[in-house]
Each structure stands twice: as structure tokens, then as C-alpha cells.
Image (tube, rainbow, N blue to C red):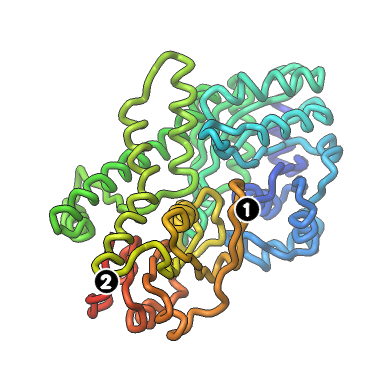
Amino acid sequence: MKKKLLKKIKTKEIIAGVVGLGYVGLPLAVEKAKAGFKTIGFDIQSSKVNMVNQGHNYIGDVVDSDLADLVNKGSLSATTDFSFIRDVHFIAICVPTPLDIHQEPDISYVRDSAKIISKYLTSETIVVLESTTYPGTTEELILPILEEGSGLKCGQDFYLGFSPERVDPGNLIYKTKNTPKVVGAVGNDAAEVISAMYREVLDGEVFTVSSPAVAEMEKILENTYRNVNIGLINEIGRLCNEMGISIWEVIDAAKTKPYGFQPFYPGLGGHCIPLDPYYLAWKAREYGFHTTLIENSMVINDSQPEYCVERAMHILNRQKKAINGAKVLMLGVSYKNDIDDCRESPAIRVMKELKKVGAEVEYYDPWVPEFKNMYGQSAKSIEKLLPDVISSFDLIMVTAAHHNVDYEMVQKNAKMIFDTKNVMSEIMDRENIEVL
């Protein structure tokens, strides 16, 4: 099986499949098709499928003309009919792995994907999970589902592995194509074949590890490393505020050291960065192990939205204005700058907390005209950011560092500004600006 698949990879006879056409799946599907592999995308959302088949792009990291060209040539197509998995030789699972309302891993999308794949899985097929998850998912959850549903044997009839996505939406340097890839698989043969496939598709180095669990833990480590350091900066930032010191200036000074220091910045939180430590802490409890340092950083970062609302209250109090009844305009609800993804966005939590204390909240986001999340929150952006609109609010809160916002106009017309992103650092007139 290994020799057959390696030959098919070299000759581009492999038909590739991608389950989940979101921020991870669609760019991966495009790269597979561009590399010469006929590719089929699978998604339960017919709207996404229809857009792909019409050559209409909805992901920032995909070049519009690339998608349209691949679809027109017949190299890339999409479907909601998962029975076509029987025609596919390489399947990448790229579905969401959020937290549920109890802050525990929701692996239902991964489980459901494995179940439906198992119904149509054929011999000499490669299955790779790319969704971020806890160590053990591939072998403890996916493997038995695929074997039971298909009647096939892993390692004998099909190969299974884990290769964590490393998508950073909006990154101008690293995209799916040139980002290094880590591969862990069930057995050496599977690892060799999966790595060979990625090397044919990607320009980034492919690094093979000894097992799926190592690759799963590696991904968790990447994001937990960031989460812990962001927690440190958020805590020091709070202390700096009490001491009347600018944390941003402190960081700028510290990063002049050419070794032993990497800059991290205070903020509201993020998307997958704060989710991953929850997966690790949840899995660690199975072994009676408490991830004390990690959990402490999670407590700090999780409380940042409430802390920012508290700071907003103090800003308004100094203007002899109560938060209850105050008009607050939030600039940005996406989880990072210049993208339209607001899943798990801490800015939306800030909105929720502001409303809890009686503020009248609206938002402006040129990337997110409206949203509805899993907690039942929904809102629409104001249409235009005009001087008279800005001046009508008691407080402007910058909650996403979008580049297509006229911050000088905002500063000139705002009563007070709470800049949680330090995007106004270059503006000289700072009488109405307070920074996180």
C-alpha cells in the first residue's frame, strides 16, 4: 500500500478531499489543487459549497483569481454529498473544535466527520486530522470510529495521521503554502506517505514526529506558550496601569534586547490561542495532573474583558458620567485585525459585559457587518464612521486594530477614547486617549 500511494502521489493520481471549507480547509484545498491534485471540498453548509463551485472566494488568505481558475479548469469542486468520499484517496479533516458553554472541548464536529467518512472509506485511503484538539484524539477517537464504520484496519487498509493546521488569518508573510508542517501518524509507513503528500503540495518544510499524540501536543504547546506569555503581559499591564507606567513603552524598551526576550502585548484575548490551553487542562485531569501555571494564565486572560469594562467605567467616571446609560461605540468585533472572523472574539464578550452594567453599546466593523454567536448574541455594525457619529458617543473603545479605520478622525471628534490595541500610538494629541 505504501509503494502504491507514494507512486500515486508522485504522478498526481491521488484525488484529494478536504472536509470543512473554512479558514483552514479552503486554503488547503486550493493549494492541493494548485499542486496538480484533483480536489473535492466537503462541507455541510450549502452556501459555502455554492460559492466555491461558482469560483467566488470568501476567505481572505485565498487569492480570488486562483480559486476561480481552479474551479473553471475542473481541478477544484465542492459538495455537500459526502458519499463522494469513496472517490477520494487523501482526506484532510479541517472542522472547528470550539469550547462548549461549560468551557470544555466540543469535539462533536470531529466525531461527526469521522463517522460520515467511515461510511464511505475505501482501501488505500489516507485520513489526516488537521483540527486543533487534545492529545490522543486521533488514536483514541478517530481510529476506532473509522475502523468500526468501514470494517477496514488502520495501517493495513488505510493510513491515519494528525497534522496540525498553522493558519494565521491576515498574516502577510506566512500562508498555508509556505508555513512549515508537522506530521504524526499511526505507524512509520503512514507517516512517510502523509509527509510525502504534504511535500508535494507545500513549500514549507515537513517535519515528521513519532506519533499523532506528539503532533497534537506540539500544536497545543505552540498556542499555550503564547497564552502563558500573554497572561504575563496582561498581569504586568494591570500593575503598570496602577503605577502610572505605560506597558507599551516598557515592552518597546525590553524588546531592544537581542536575545532572551520575545515581545507579547496586552489585549482582550483571541480565538484559538485561549481555547487550546483548555483542551490541555481538560486532558491533564484524566491523569490527575493540574496545569497550574497554564490555568493561572487562563484566569488572567479570561478576565481581560471584565477588566477592560472596569477601566471604561473609570474613564467615564472621570468625566462625571456613569456607565449606566452611557453611549459606547466599539471599533471592531473580529478577534484580530483586518479579518472577518469573530468566533470566540473577546470583543463580543466586552460588548456583553458593557450591556450588563447598563451601557448602550453599538459597534463599527468594516469587516463584520453583522454577527450572531453561539451564546445568542447578535448585532449589526453602524454603516459609516462619520464625525457626527463619533461625537454622539460618550466613549469610543478600540477593540480591534483594523487598518481601514480613520483613527485621526476618530480622535478629533471623540469625547473620550479607550484604545485597547494601542493603534493610536502615533497620534500626537492624546488628551482624550487612554491606552490599555
Q: Is residue 333 left or right of residue 115?
A: left
Secondary element at tag 1: helix
Question: Where residue 16 sits in the image (x, y, percent)?
Answer: 73, 42
Q: Is residue 342 above or below residue 391?
A: above
Q: Amino acid at mark 2?
A: Gln
At a point 32% along the width and 45% down the height, the residue shown is: 230
Question: Where residue 315 sits in the image (x, y, percent)?
Answer: 28, 65
Question: Where residue 52 sits in the image (x, y, percent)?
Answer: 75, 58
Residue 226 seen from this side: yes
Q: Is residue 387 left or right of residue 420?
A: right
At a point 42% along the width and 68% down the height, the residue shown is: 328
Q: Sequence-wise, which precedes: disc 1 or disc 2? A: 1
At a point 16% along the width and 57% down the height, the residue shown is: 253
Pointer 2 residue: 319
Q: Amino acid at mark 1?
A: Pro
Q: Quadrant of residue 228?
A: top left
Q: Quadrant of residue 340?
A: bottom right
**Closer to us: 121 or 409:** 409
**Closer to us: 164 or 113:** 113
Disc 2 crowd, CA 10 A, few/some/many (<14, 14-19, 20+): few
Residue 174 seen from this side: no
| Viewer-side label of 1, 2 | 2
Pointer 1 residue: 27
Cβ–Cβ below 8 Å for labels 1 and 2? no
Q: Give the distance between the C-alpha atoms of the residues marked 1 and 2, in whole angstroms.
A: 48 Å
At a point 49% along the width and 79% down the height, the residue shown is: 385
Q: Which image quadrant: the C terminus?
A: bottom left
